[in-house]
Image: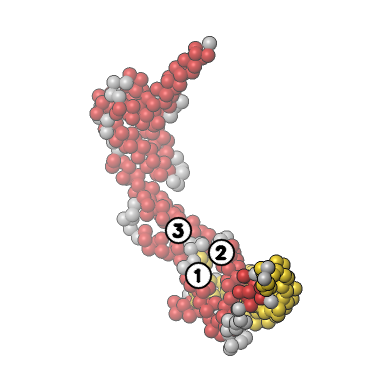
Amino acid sequence: MKTISRLRYFIYLSILFVGCTTGKNALQKGDYDAAVSKAVDRLRSSPQNKDAMAVLPQAFDLAIKTHLRKIDEAKVSADALKWETILYNYQRINQLSDEVNSCPSCLNLVPNPPKYVKAAEDSKYQAAEARYLLGERALRENNRQSAKTAYNHFLKAESFYPSLKGIKDKIDDAYWAAVLKVVVQPAIINSNTYKLSNDYFQQQVNNYLANYRGNTFVRFYSEAEANKQKIRADQLLELRFDDFVVGQTYVKERVEKLKRDSVVIGESRRGKIYGTVTATYSIFEKQVSSSGLLNYAVIDLNTNKVLRNQKLAGTYVWVDNWASFKGDERALDKQQYALTRKREVLPPPPGNLFVEFTKPIYTQLIDQINSFYSRY
């Protein structure tokens, strides 16, 4: 019984496999394009396959009629984008015909498959013209959102017909009408001592914003760039260090009593003498802490409204360790002894410490900018 069941299962799979590869199942489901493609593929490898030979002429005829019907329906519709539907269907007919032409045995079953090359080219032009008109209409609404819509229409028009007159200028016009222009004010700090370190922080921010790709429709400018290019900015991004402390120093000492047994402390006639050695071990840890607060604000220059105002905190702690001992050094392990050979070192210069605590602030700032401007 098991053998019969398995045989039936494999027969079923074989029938199913043949039906799929010849396009018979696709034809029965009304997917005529797929039926043509599967039948052509089958006939390329097996030119005398009866199922595929039966499927191809019927599926091809139904596929062409279906696409031509959709073309006729689209031509009389009021859809502004109807030419894209028409173009798609002409392209599908041409693709199906190319598939048949690439299979010698298929041409015996479907001689002279039709091609609509000129009709497809004309449809491309008509589709591009329709997108161009929609783009112009959206651009006349004179706001950023409609300019973005116009930009996408013009890009689509160019993809259909790259040589369409004036299309590149229209794309450019729409893009700049859609772009949100943001001027970035240099980070303010009330300290000449840390001016160079602050300039380094500002340069890092400027470099990121100069290469910003988070949103196509947002561009950042320094104040100098905006003035030079006569940019009429939409927003101002303000940065200001409200508060910071550099180089707060803390030194901690921890004392441990060390003891080690079974250490050779001498010799006698009978051999080595073992005993216990001890030491007082002092561990020193110096921490130099630096921290600050950056105020980050976004202001709408058309309304003077504050759109975002946040304080971003950053901290950097430099740490140094060394040790000393009194007593027998044999009470110390290797790591403990190595630390006693180390001497106290000077912390980095204040300017370097300033840069270090601004690094986490920079990371937070970039995250905030990416999040805020993703909505535009």
Q: Residue at x 50, y 70 (%)?
A: 209
Query: Residue 356: x percent and y percent?
Result: 58, 76
SS for callout 3: helix
SS for callout 2: helix
Residue 104 visible, this orientation = yes
Give the mark nearest the N terminus, 3 or 1.
3
Mark 2 vs mark 1: in front: 1
Name the residue tied to disc 2. 370
Residue 187 visible, this orientation = no
Give the mark nearest the N terminus, 2 or 3.
3
Name the residue tied to disc 3. 151
Mark 3 vs mark 1: in front: 1
How far apart marks 2 and 3 lie (CA) works out to 22 Å
Give the mark nearest the N terminus, 2 or 1.
1
Residue at the front extreme of this rendering = 269
Mark 2 vs mark 3: in front: 2
The amino acid marked with disc number 1 is: Tyr
Is 145 located above or below residue 347 in the figure? above
Q: Residue at x 70, y 69 (%)?
A: 274
Is 196 located above or below residue 335 in the figure? below
The amino acid marked with disc number 2 is: Asn
Q: Quadrant of the C terminus?
A: bottom right
Is 173 located above or below residue 193 in the figure? above
Answer few, some or many: residues within 10 Å of disc 2's Cα (few below 14, many 20 plus, some between 14 and 19): some
- In the rendered image, which quarter is residue 284 located in? bottom right
Name the residue tied to disc 1. 208
